[in-house]
Image (cartoon, rainbow, N blue to C red):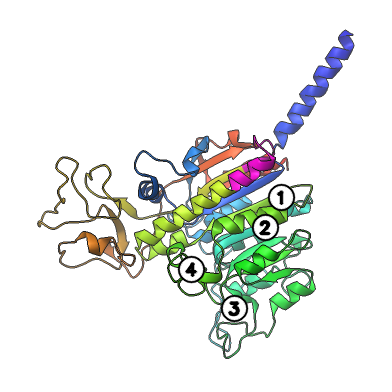
Amino acid sequence: MKRTFIAAALTLTFAQAAHAAGEAKNIIFFLGDGMGPSTITASRIYKYGEAGSLTMDTLERTARIKTYSNDAQTTDSAPSMAAYMTGVKMNNEVISMSSETVATNPGKDANGNLGINNCAASNGTAAVTILELAKAKGKAVGAITTTELTHATPASTFSHICNRNAQYAIAAQVVPGGAGYNTALGDGVDVLMGGGRNHFTPYSATNTAGRADGRNLLTELAAKGYVVASTKAEMNAASAGKKFIGLYSSKSHLEYELDRTATPPVGEGANQPSLAEMTVKAMDLLSANKDGYFLMVEGGRIDHALHGTNAKRALTDTIAFDDAIKAALDKAKATDPTLANTLIVVTADHDHTLAFNGYGKKGNPILDINRGYRDNQPSKDADGNTYTTLVFGNGPNRPNTRANLDSATVLADNYLQETGVRLASETHGGGDVKLFATGAGAKSFKGTLDNTKVFGLLKSAFGF
């Protein structure tokens, strides 16, 4: 009887150890591009007030992430996302390659587009990604984004290239069996969504940003069994069991959330899904695999609005990103109530120069002019002029002489916050970013971590 008890206890111990070594069947990795701590705080206040919480705020595990790249104090999106995906520090502009890889700009093709890949075969080696590892273990894999699908963040999950701007070559890497295919993807990425259809389709009079090589990669993908979609309705109609690619913008990124939901919607926004809708659909498609999945979800246009010093669109896109996190949690918990088999990680690739000004009164609209907490009167600068609570360290909107600002002006959709240093475009910031995690394997995400360490934690959660 005693031997039986000991044997049972040992069996349980071994089972527990095996579970701890690889707790997660599914991992969803959320990346808010450029979503630094100030952007998170401002978005929380914008939507829920100072005492409120974003969904990401409610995740029980947190960490602080160092973001510097191999050659820069302030990273760009390519090496920072690639560090999460590969565990390797690389140079700015390089996507999922070894540390010594030199960023080499692509050249212009006959149509004036950056269609010539100048990455020499001797220029570095591919660094394996967590998506590729998951695929090799039989899991389904996906990458979805509000940017062009070939942009730095999504590309870092499935591509290897010496320069992020070689987007036509990046597109070719996802077509199974085609020229330039990344064979580490096995039979192909199972779910892909984003914008930038031009990188997949031939140049023409109506597609002047198209491919100069004449290839239609979407036709090639369809021949390999992919369902190809260009609208929300086509996405919704797709059923599990086939691979899927949805490109919802003809030649650029998806619309900002503020414009996608405008009346009427701007540009192609009327037919574009929200990031939350894309996330839920991707989970539906990927969950058909009994061995689980890895899914990367990027809120990419947060970064673009910050570069443009348009805080309103940045905060609105951050809220849409947070809504996608909530949608994923709700869907995962419907079948995995305690997230015993699902790990959700939320972080950013880098900071921006967004900052808070003054001593604003609690409840004062975060995008408005600053009003003092003592008297609720407009705060004034040293010259007697009003100013906004949110500003940027650098960017294009630095007046030589400041003037009074009023609420109607600064609360408008297209208002650009003032900046300290005049530059053509606002830059990234070099500060640490936040990471949130919940579910299977989340306990390991704690303290101050280099971004490369996250890769190892993802691998451990999967048991790789």
**Residue picked out by circle 4:** 255
Q: At 74% across and 28% down in the image, what residue appears?
A: 17
Examine the rendered structure and indicate whether residue 459 appears above or below residue 80.
above
Q: Earlier in the sequence, mark 1 or mark 2?
A: 2
Amino acid type of the residue that numbered disc 3 sits on in the rendered structure: Asn
**Residue picked out by circle 1:** 293
Residue 155 point in image, percent of width and height: 61, 63
Marks 1 and 3, how far apart at CA:
28 Å
Examine the rendered structure and indicate whether residue 409 appears above or below residue 350.
below
Q: At 31% across and 67% down in the image, what residue appears?
A: 423
Q: Which residues are magenta?
A: 328-343
Examine the rendered structure and indicate whether residue 256 appears above or below residue 38.
below
Q: Is residue 301 magenta?
A: no
Q: Which mark is residue 198?
A: 3
Marks 1 and 2, how far apart at CA:
8 Å
- Neighbor class of circle 3 (other Cα within 10 Å; few <14, some 14-19, many 20+) is many
